[in-house]
Image (tube, rainbow, N blue to C red):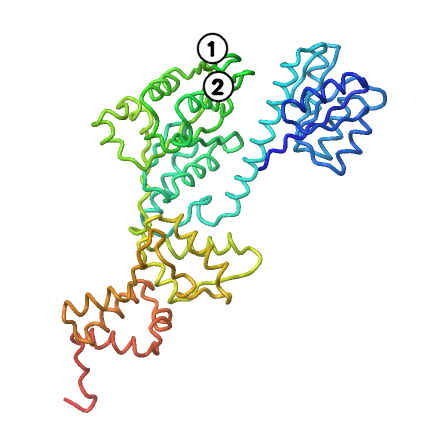
Amino acid sequence: MTVTRELLVVDDDDALRGMLRELFQEEGYSVWDAPSAEAALELTRDREVDVVLSDVNMPGKSGIELVGELRRVRPEAPVVLMTAFASIASAVEAMRAGAFDYITKPFENDVALLAVERALEHRVLEEENRRLRLAVDRTSALGDLIGASPAMREIFALVRKIAHSRASVLITGESGTGKDVVARTIHFHGSRAKQPFLPINCTALPEGLLESELFGHVRGAFTGAHAAKRGLFEKATGGTLFLDEIGDMSLPLQGKLLRVLQDGEVRPVGGSETSRVDVRIIAATNRDLGKAIDEGLFREDLFYRLNVIPIHVPPLRERPEDIPPLVEAFLRKHSPDRPRAVSAAALVWLKAQTWRGNARELENAIERALVLAELDELRVDDLRTRDPRGTPEVDPAALLLESAAESSLSLEELSERYTEEILRRCGGNKVHAAAILKIDRKTLYRRAERRARGQGEPPPSRSSG
């Protein structure tokens, strides 16, 4: 979701409205204002806003009534109410109406800024989780996990077993194998599915910033910390925190992470007070953590904390059976309004590639071919390209012929072996295999009969014997 930071301020006090408009504009918000609940409702019918900051006591509809109306018109926009009449009763009434937060007048500017910032973070997280849940609901296998290989079926079974657990999970595998997809599937098929799923890449941020993102910071903790900020551990409470590329985390930060996992408490950078957190940790890495431990680059005690449930995602070259369903999924994803297909020959070609970038590289190839292909059926020529590192793409047919020539295979032997391989890749489906080989399927039956009678010897004449 694109964060536009659009704020609607609703108050019948012109001076307060003007002050709040200037305050939030200085913080980078686009601010709209309305002098009454009726004017606010009229404005929101034609305009999307991210957060609403409204007074409670106004002529006409009250702020609490406005909350109820906005729940129908703009249910995605959280509302922060402000009032000069602080009481438990009015706070409970506001929350029951659906308000996100509640502040009392007079208030410090930082109080209003923090309340709106929290509401905006809530808005972003709600939208992200809604999008991810929809993506999971649309898939055919297990969430976004797609595959037909024995390895993927084992992962499906394991995910179903552990989804409702709170045990830590460590997902290993090469880049592009879909470790993040496994993590999301675990979360959205478990009891925490309606709570936040927050990912962070441990490689993408420098150590100091990563620490602040994870644990939060207090105001003045470091240069530029103008306001307190909650960390991902607090934001993900009740849900899941996905630590991608955990193998790249620095040793000092590993120690601080281990302390949080052991104590269940988090202390913001520069702070002295701790907060209890209830977060499930899923970590992923493409590194050999055993080797990293031996080299002193990864803490062994943290490894055991994370590796309660290990999941290894094999590279795509080791599970060619997963390529057809992945291709189908990528076709639907990148051409939702125009049915497209892949020819039988192109599918065989796709399964013969090594896919060093795994599923990510395969998806890139399909997306590119959909843009460049003129027909609704993708052919081998639509998929061929040059290796981006500058070397010509390996032609599997040329490799096959070179290997056959070195082995001095006869034409009959080459034909038999190729036919057997196509049959294997087609799962024994002779109709499909015959279409790829461009021969009559009766020929396949005759070849099978000859092999059964004696490795290629012709059957005895019907008149003999």
- Which amino acid does the dot numbered 1 rest on? Gly
Quadrant showing the C terminus: bottom left
Dots 1, 2 in contact, CB < 8 A: yes
Residue on which the image places disc 2 = 216
Could you tell me which secondary element the residue under label 2 belongs to? strand
Percent x, y of residue 239: 48, 28
The structure residue drawn at horizontal position 41% and vertical position 30%, both measured from the top left corner, is 165
Q: Residues within 10 Å of mark 1 (few under 14, many from 20)?
A: some
Determine which quarter of the picture holds residue 392.
Answer: bottom left
92 shown above or below 436: above
Horizontal relation, residue 44 to residue 332: left or right: right
Percent x, y of residue 95: 67, 20
The structure residue drawn at horizontal position 58% and vertical position 35%, both measured from the top left corner, is 127
As drawn, the residue found furthest toward the bottom would be 463
Q: Quote the CA–CA distance across marks 1 and 2.
A: 9 Å
Determine which quarter of the picture holds residue 37.
Answer: top right
Residue on which the image places disc 1 = 271
Q: Earlier in the sequence, mark 1 or mark 2?
A: 2
Front in this rendered view, residue 203 or 236: 203
Any mark on residue 102, and which?
A: none
Front in this rendered view, residue 232 or 212: 212
